[in-house]
Image (spheres, helix red, strand yellow):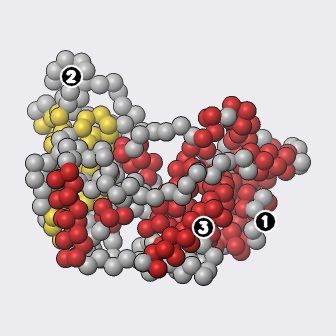
Amino acid sequence: MDPSRPNRILDDWAAVASEARRPSSAPRPVAVRSGLPGATLAGASLIVVGLFVAGVLLGRPGPSDTVGTSPSPQGPVASDPSASPSSSGGLCRPEDVDARITMWEGAAGSRIADVELKQTGSVPCGLETMAIPRLVNGHGDVLIAGSAPARTTTIRFAPGEVVRTLVRTSNYCGPAPEPPVTVGFVTSYDALFVATPPSPTDTTLPPCNGTPGSAGTIEMQPWAR
Amino acid sequence: MATADATDYAYERAFEENWSDVFRFALAWTNDWTSAEDLAQDAYLRLWNHRGRLDWNRPVLPWLLVTTRRLATDRFRTLRRRLLSTPHPATIDGDPGLRARWLDVCAAMADLSPLERTALVMTAIEGASYEEAGEVLGTTAGALRAAVSRARTKLENA
């Protein structure tokens, strides 16, 4: 036991931390992410118009934060930080929903995840019925990536409401993944809903139907009540 | 237009005056330099998003620290960032000497929980009272005293 050791460590911690360099400029959100799958200028314009309409229709109020007090529970703190502020106006954000895999079903050459999505916010939000599904491992690495949907609609998703979907995935021929394996859904505005897996150690994977290293597939049905 | 200019200015000032505090808080919580930089950036993006609704006459730092803590405890935040963003090197990677010193400190603090580490840093280094730290950390002064005591014991016995 060394009673002086905590103070020495704290002194070192303070000295090292004080050398952190502030970024040259204050962070500002990017208006439109260049990495949107298949995004074109026209597509981006449509997204912006769509988001505006959704925002007006849904009339989502913002949190009434006050500097000097704790942010409200519905404050900004749990949403996807990488999404731009304009990209989620009225549309469901990750902190508005709770996704979970209720069970995995076996099928010939495939595995099907029953996924439940509950609206946990306090005001209605707009939910896109289709998204880009992904199978991911416990590190967030994408094991199988789906395609952008050809079309999607936006439904009104009220607090407490639950919708469900089935996600079918096939042909995983990669190495054994880090648990837990789960599914995620990327919206058109780059929000990501990651489902809680059935267990922290779940490694449900579709069987490899092809040659080692061949690409897998993953697709979802529209979210429905 | 005048309002936007005023809040822009207030935001810039909050960045200049408080970024170091926010970063150190995030560093204490995560014990990870890269994550702390990301958290600080995300906290300021939150502030930017809400700058028009804030009372800028009151101190902004408590809001930033609470926001940082909540971002840090968002269980899927790390997963989302890994899926959606390109990993970037921490600024410390460009300074081998500083990086080596940080790794020593990081290892020494690794056995502490985020709450123990942050409570210890806030009270022993930043000079916050247990009550002030408790408001930011969402717990009581008594719980923080216990956390600080545990932290010191762990460091003594390490």
Q: Chain of mark 2?
A: A
Q: Secondary structure at mark 3?
A: helix
Q: For the point 73% across and 33% down, which residue is it?
A: B97
B46, above or below B83, in the image = below
Q: Observer-nearest residue: B144 or A134?
A: A134
Q: Are discs 2 and 1 located on one and the same chain?
A: no
Disc 3: CA contacts within 10 A as few (<14), some (14-19) or many (>=20): some
Query: Which is nearer the eye, A142 or A48?
Result: A48
* Quarter where residue B57 is shown: bottom right
Check disc 2 and report the residue beneath it.
A214
Distance from Cα at disc 3 to Cα at disc 1: 20 Å
Q: Along the horizontal axis of the image, is A133 left or right of B120? A: left
Label 1 resides on the chain identified as: B
Q: Relative to A94, is A16 on the left or the right? A: right
Residue type beneath disc 3: Ala
Q: Residue at x 59, y 62 (%)?
A: B15
Q: Chain of mark 3?
A: B
Q: Which residue is mark 1?
A: B127
How many neighbours does mark 1 have within 10 angstroms: few (below 14), some (14-19), or many (20 or more)? few
| Front residue of A106 and B52 | B52
Disc 1 is placed on an element classified as loop
Three-letter residue code for mark 1: Gly
Task: Please give the residue where the numbered disc 3 appears in the rendered image.
Answer: B14
Q: Is residue A210 above or below residue A133?
A: above
Residues tagged by mark 3 and mark 1 found on one chain of the structure: yes
Mark 2 nearby-residue class (10 Å; few <14, some 14–19, many ≥20): few
